[in-house]
């Protein structure tokens, strides 16, 4: 079963884990803490149906972050943005809280909390995973003010991923970055690897290609893979996959509760995405 890889902040839900006892971090699902390696990758926090969620995103222009449609389509109010690589080692998260969860954040609530404020937009042809030929799980956050001091990451040129057909694809490593949950064995009880909500920080992993479709790049996100170091998990939704410095996908979905199988990544090198991004003056690298 495909599962969204965004994450609830501070509450328990089917697609996320509760806040659990913190322990030393490893990374997304394997991998390492990112530190300052990818400063253009940020975390976005938003309200939807009264719940507070987090996703990942990439600065692609001074005023635009690229993320997933399922992280933007139902947003109530404004979206909070931070580029801090470490948010919280242990609870509480310190994230801003809306006075009215049903209405979502206001810009004032966000900026008073020390975060950047923006407005979310989903791709108009996002199919909510109902049309395999027209997935379009991509969205943007338009910031109220331009970001200073962070260089935006370039979008891959048109059809960039077409060069990675098999057998090249499964020999190619892609770099996944995001603020997703760490997967590790609990401190007590059954020792099954489980997604943990803390520490909350930016992580990075390398994943080998597995399948390429006109809409999706699928990678092997298992940390035990002999070629890669891990993959995405809950909270990594919307975060980038890089290759040769280009943003080639945004994280879309996963297949398992413990984030140790295949990752589905929405391509951003395709015309349906790049034509839409151009309406926000975001264009691919030439």
Image (spheres, grey):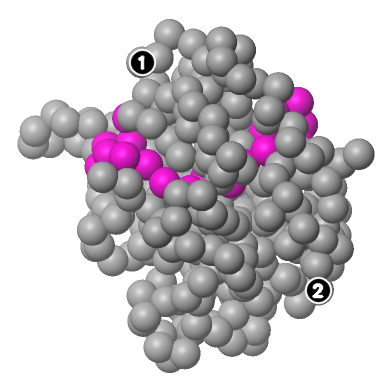
Q: Where residue 223 sits: x, y (%)?
A: 39, 21
The quadrant of the rendering that contains the C terminus is top right
Give the residues in magenta.
Answer: 242-260
Task: Using the numbered discs, state the Cα–Cα distance from disc 1 to disc 2 in whole angstroms.
Answer: 42 Å
Q: Secondary structure at mark 1?
A: loop
Residue 269, given in percent of the width and then of the height, sits at 71, 42
Q: Nearer the viewer, mark 1 or mark 2?
A: 1
Res 33 visible: no
Instruction: Say the numbered circle drawn on residue 238.
Output: none
Residue placed most toward the observer, 29 or 275: 275
Residue at image mark 2: 145
In the picture, the quarter occupied by the N terminus is top left
Does 255 lie within the magenta span? yes
Above or below residue 282? Residue 167 is above
Using residue 121 as the reference point, say whether residue 154 is left or right of it.
right
Question: Residue at left 80%, top 67%?
Answer: 280
Sequence-wise first label, 1 or 2:
2
* Residue for point 54% across, 68% down: 72
The image quadrant of residue 285 is top right
The 10 Å Cα crowd at callout 2, few under 14, some 14 to 19, many 20 or more, is: few
Circle 1 Cα neighbour tier, 10 Å, few/some/many (<14 / 14–19 / ≥20): some
Q: Position of residue 125 (x, y in %)?
A: 58, 66
Q: Is residue 15 above or below residue 40?
A: below
Q: Is residue 268 visible?
A: yes
Q: Which residue: 64% across, 86% down?
A: 108
Q: Nearer the viewer, residue 68 or 235?
A: 68
Q: Where 83 sits versus 98, above or below?
A: above
Residue at (67% x, 38% y) in the render? 248
- Magenta includes 245? yes
Element class at badge 2: loop
Residue at the spot of label 1? 224
**Residue 151, image x and y in percent?**
84, 47
């Amino acid at each position: 079963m495909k599962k969204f890889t965004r994450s609830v902040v501070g509450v328990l839900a089917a697609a996320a884990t509760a806040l659990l006892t913190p322990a030393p971090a490893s990374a997304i699902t394997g991998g390492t803490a990112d530190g300052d390696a990818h400063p253009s990758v940020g975390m976005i926090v938003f309200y939807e149906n009264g719940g507070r969620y987090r996703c990942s995103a990439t600065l692609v222009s001074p005023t635009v972050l690229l993320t997933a449609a399922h992280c933007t389509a139902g947003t109530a109010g404004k979206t909070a943005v931070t580029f801090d690589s470490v948010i919280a080692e242990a609870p509480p998260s310190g994230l801003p809280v809306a006075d009215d969860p049903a209405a979502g954040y206001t810009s004032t609530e966000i900026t008073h909390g020390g975060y950047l404020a923006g407005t979310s937009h989903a791709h108009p042809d996002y199919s909510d995973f109902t049309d395999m030929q027209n997935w379009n799980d991509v969205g943007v956050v338009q910031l109220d003010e331009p970001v200073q001091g962070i260089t935006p990451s370039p979008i891959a040129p048109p059809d960039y991923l077409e060069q990675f057909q098999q057998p090249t694809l499964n020999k190619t490593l892609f770099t996944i970055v995001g603020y997703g949950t760490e997967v590790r064995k609990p401190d007590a009880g059954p020792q099954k690897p489980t997604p943990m909500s803390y520490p909350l920080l930016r992580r990075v992993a390398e994943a080998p290609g597995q399948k390429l479709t006109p809409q999706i790049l699928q990678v092997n996100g298992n940390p035990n893979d002999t070629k890669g170091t891990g993959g995405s998990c809950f909270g990594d939704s919307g975060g980038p996959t890089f290759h040769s410095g280009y943003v080639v996908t945004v994280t879309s979905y996963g297949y398992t509760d413990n984030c140790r199988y295949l990752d589905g990544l929405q391509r951003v090198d395709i015309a349906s995405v790049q034509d839409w991004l151009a309406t926000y003056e975001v264009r691919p690298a030439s």
